[in-house]
Image (cartoon, rainbow, N blue to C red):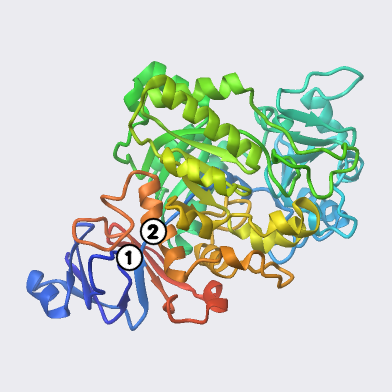
Amino acid sequence: MDKILYHGTFLTMDESRTEPEAVLIRDGMIGGTGTLEEMKALAPDGALWDMEGHTVLPGFIDGHSHLSAVAYQLLIANLKPSPLGTCDSVEDVVQVLKTFLETHSLKPGQWLLGMGYDNSVFPEGVHPTKEDLDRVSTEIPVAATHVSGHLCVVNTKGLELLGYTGDHFTVPEGGVVEPTGLLKEQAFLGKNGVMQGPAPEDVVKAVGDASELYASYGLTTVHDGKVTEGQYQLLKGAASMGLLKNDVVMYLIPELAGQFLTEQGPEALAAKGYENHLRPAGVKLFLDGSPQGKTAWLSEPYYVVPDGEKPDYRGFPVQREAYVMDIMRTCVKNRWQINVHANGDEAIEQMIRCYQSVLEETGSEKNLRPVVIHCQTVREDQLDRMKAIGMIASFFLDHVYYWGDYHYESVLGPERAARISPARSALERGVSFTLHQDSPVAPPDVMGAVHNAVNRKTAKGRVLGPEQTITVMEALKAVTVNGAYQIFEEDRKGSIAAGKDADLVVLERNPLTVPKDELREIRVLETIKSGDTIFRL
């Protein structure tokens, strides 16, 4: 049935059109925009849908996150600090894990897993140790993952199962194992198959719950930004069961992408239609770690280097240059988009250098819109070069609020911290950018991301780099128009215009008229996907 939305403020994000009085939805698409009488003439029998004076925008589009990891996190211990959790000290982490173990039945071989601890807010600023987790259990393997997702502490039993005991053991390239039980980067990311978590059937159901969580924040298109074979099968299963409410784009790890190439040919990762709201969209590659974990690869030393490191410690790369070149060469030759995790400016330099080299080597002139994920410490000169080769930046502006003070005081120092996620500099250079929250690192609260891009205020109230703030409209474009462009779907998403998907979000208040320090308080009242409500408050 045709539906006519009226009595609302419609922010179409389409600069070629004035804001309409009404919007027609027909067959899951936008059938037209204009006055209420014009829409009634187009659809005389259309159902009238009163927006009650609220504000309607195109459905929000995620710039980068991990849907399957969000689902997984719903089933494990929440180790996040206040206000997202209760773990404000190492002792809190231990107690939450103990309580989880007492209240949940683990299957034989299953690890006790928790995620989200943040040592930067702990009184002493130290990570938990294997001895701390041994207090939880010495018989069950226990793992506590850092909020960044790039560090993990395991107990003694866990170290044994991972093969990290004795005087001599092998650590995957790009990883570090510390005597305290702290594992960095590939030391645990490369061991996910060993760290057995919740049962697959429970995780499949949780994917549906995670999809609904994203919808509650107004997201109609979601990313899963690092998909392994197991996660691919998980998402396919959830999709076939009708559990996905939003469209989900997947970026596959290189090994899985190579398998697609062998079995299905290069067209397997081309921009294709969704099947049960799911489609593979490209390849994901990691070049470094996280700034708050002090594993991001910088060109200059950390402001305060981690204990035990030399004064010139700058973090480290996680991939050999030859490997990076090989993956990028495969992507360009097969016309695949690549999303590259690069926080530190030295990692960003490696991405630009390698991608530029591959373009010159292959003679490719096709704009494949490579994306620098996080792009946290990108320099002005790097933004200029990104623009020249069509690179997109996806900024994690929540860093300003959650870890901005830590960056200022310990990670980067005042000068470099003021430039994290430099959205204004990107705008001035014409570099397209999106916003994201790298969920489950932070909740997929899109209006929170908009708030942080506009205000750049830390948890302590410090304005971090006021010259890098952007306007509300510029931030809204980043999560609508630019989000669609990033995934090659600008012809069907990102604005409210005839012929596009009827993906919409209804906000309680108009972001353009509320005080800018209240942006994060605006509630999502309803989320509409292809004309159907997938969330209502």
Q: CA distance from mark 2 to mark 1?
A: 8 Å
Q: Are the two marked residues, 2 and 1, in contact with CB atoms closer than 8 angstroms?
A: yes
Task: Choose between 314 and 135: the one closer to the eye.
Answer: 314
N-terminal of the pair, mark 2 or mark 1, is 1
Other-residue count near label 2 (Cα within 10 Å), few / some / many at <14 / 14–19 / ≥20: many
Query: What element does badge 1 sit on?
Result: loop
Left/right placement of residue 167 relative to residue 99 reads right
Q: Tag on residue 5?
A: none
Residue 88: percent from left, percent from top = 81, 61
Q: Name the residue located 43 percent from the left edge and 79 percent from the top edge.
A: 509
Q: Is residue 71 above or below residue 328?
A: below
For the C terminus, give its image quadrant.
Answer: bottom left
Q: Label 1 amino acid?
A: Met
Residue 357: percent from left, percent from top = 49, 25
Q: Name the residue located 56 percent from the left edge and 37 percent from the top edge.
A: 200
Residue 311: percent from left, percent from top = 87, 40
In the picture of the structure, the residue carrying the numbered disc 2 is: 480
Query: What element does badge 2 sit on?
Result: loop
Q: Quadrant of residue 5?
A: bottom left
Other-residue count near label 1 (Cα within 10 Å), few / some / many at <14 / 14–19 / ≥20: many
Residue 202: percent from left, percent from top = 56, 43
Task: Choose between 39 and 461: the one closer to the eye.
Answer: 461
Q: Is residue 260 above or below residue 311?
A: above
Q: Name the residue located 69 percent from the left edge and 67 percent from the top edge.
A: 458
Q: Is residue 329 above or below residue 375?
A: above
Q: Tag on residue 13?
A: 1
Task: Choose between 456 and 73: the one closer to the eye.
Answer: 456
Q: Label 2 amino acid?
A: Thr
Q: Name the residue located 91 percent from the left edge and 38 percent from the top edge.
A: 308
